[in-house]
Amino acid sequence: MNWGILIGVLAYEVLLIVGLGLFFARRQEHQKKEGGFLLSNRDLPVAVVAVTLALTVLGTPHIFGVFEMTWFLGAGSIWFGIAHAVLLVVAITTTALWARRANVTSMPEFIALIFGEGPRLMVGCVMAGLIFGILTLESQGIGIVFATVTGISIQQGAVIGGVLGILYVILAGMKEIGWVNLINCSIMYVGLILTMIFMSGALPEGGWGEVANFYISQDQAQMLSIFASPELLFTFALGTILSTTFCQSISQQLIQPAMAAKSEKTIRRTLWLAVPLNGLFCVFIASIGLAAKANPAFNELGPKLAAPTMLLNSLPGWLVAWLMASLLAAVLSSFAMAVMAPATIFTIDIYKNFFNPDAGEREERIVTRTMIVVLGVAAFMVAAYLPPIVQAMNWLFAWMTPVFWLIIIGLFWKRSSSAAVITLAVTWIVNSLWSFTALPAMVGMEGQPNVYPCLLVGVGLGVVLTAILPGKPGLFKELDAAPATDAEAEAVPAE
């Protein structure tokens, strides 16, 4: 076991996380403002919001998922990063602004403003479960980081990382996550750049040219292009862009940092920082994956171990520790928001909505912290028994596809609670049938991602039912308000 690397990484993470967490926790105790733990008093600046948006959707799938994908798709795996860049553009210019303007604390609460309590409960339960699924994947990634570098088991690594992930958020909530992310992001990108420099020097004679020659000699030149084939573009690239965008752009996990921003203007300004920070990451990871497969010394290890093992053997010890801290920071940031989001949903949409409507900041903090511990422990307990990372993510993402379109319909056209309930129920049934029955083969779409049927059913049924069933004018239409105007950025009153 590499005790030096393990101790160094743990010391860095603990000092940073606990130090900043305790500092901001003490400030919150003195300020005693509402929403301090869940939304940082809605005071986060541009840089903190931008980095948190970028890192929230940059975790295990971007690292170990892309390592695996690169083995089979080559440079085409970069579409996974492009999909998340598209997601951030859509979220920052639409749903993040709308949720911040509505002055809500959770996305199910936003759904309640539009459609009422029935759809709120449906979306809240499914969204919390979906995010918990993501949380378990992030726990798996944490376990793999520790297992690869230190030699401990994935289960042990997941427990160590899970404790760090809980500490990442439990001391001061959203403010702690944001400011720790800002420091970790800087460390991460410097580490990645240094890794690429050192790794380039450690490649076999011929460098990156020899990597390209490997694929050409194996009659796999298409692995070097992101436009390898129409099938790749349709089944993977487009499918990933659609499922990622329509799910995460209305997910509590991504939108909560935007809810904590100072203003809508703050959110808009994050576009130029968050998108490149997230989108470029996959380029680094895919390049490492391509080099690992092309290197005979590591090729035989297969898609899960080749790239991590190559890094471990090609880099000096101090850089291995730095890289481990960098990768761990990326996964921990996603873990923190993935545990914070369902805890927030439980606190606001279950505990406060049904059991204690008068709960104040202290009660909210206690309930949220309790759920953070419960969810975090549950996640790392099952971290070593999960399916392939990216396939699992795409299945999870399809569940929220109809919600995205229902929000648009309900804000700008017409609000029908009955139409929303029926559309959600039918689409979710179709998503399950698509995964667990022969339905895809029956309709001639075998192998196509879940987002396609969910998109067709969700949009089609949502539009038709909204048109024929009774309802109210769209929320923004009824209020005669532009959702992205700072001058009108006041809280939307509940019906």
Image: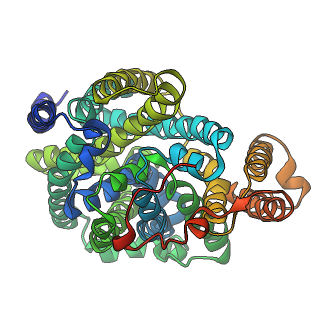
Furthest residue to the right?
A: 442
The picture places residue 266, in percent across and down from the top left corner, at 27, 66
Task: Out of 267 and 454, give the one closest to the viewer.
Answer: 267
* Above/below status of 201 relative to 340: below
Task: Out of 294 and 135, give the one closest to the viewer.
Answer: 135
* Above/below status of 343 relative to 397: above
Task: Out of 420 and 18, give the one closest to the viewer.
Answer: 420
Quarter occupied by residue 325: top left
Total marks placed: 0
Quarter occupied by residue 29: top left
Q: Which color scheme is applied?
A: rainbow
The picture places residue 258, in percent across and down from the top left corner, at 35, 56
In the rendered view, does 421 fall on the left or right side of 274?
right
Name the image quarter holding the N terminus. top left
Asked if residue 153 shows in the view, the reply is: no
Task: Out of 193 and 80, give the one closest to the viewer.
Answer: 80
Residue at horizontal 50 percent and vertical 47 percent from the top: 107
Residue at horizontal 25 percent and vertical 64 percent from the top: 203
Asked if residue 413 shows in the view, the reply is: yes
The picture places residue 131, in percent across and down from the top left corner, at 50, 40
In the rendered view, does 63 fall on the left or right side of 194?
right
Residue at horizontal 29 percent and vertical 51 percent from the top: 310
Residue at horizontal 82 percent and vertical 57 percent from the top: 470
The picture places residue 33, in percent across and down from the top left corner, at 22, 38
In the rendered view, does 449 fall on the left or right side of 166?
right
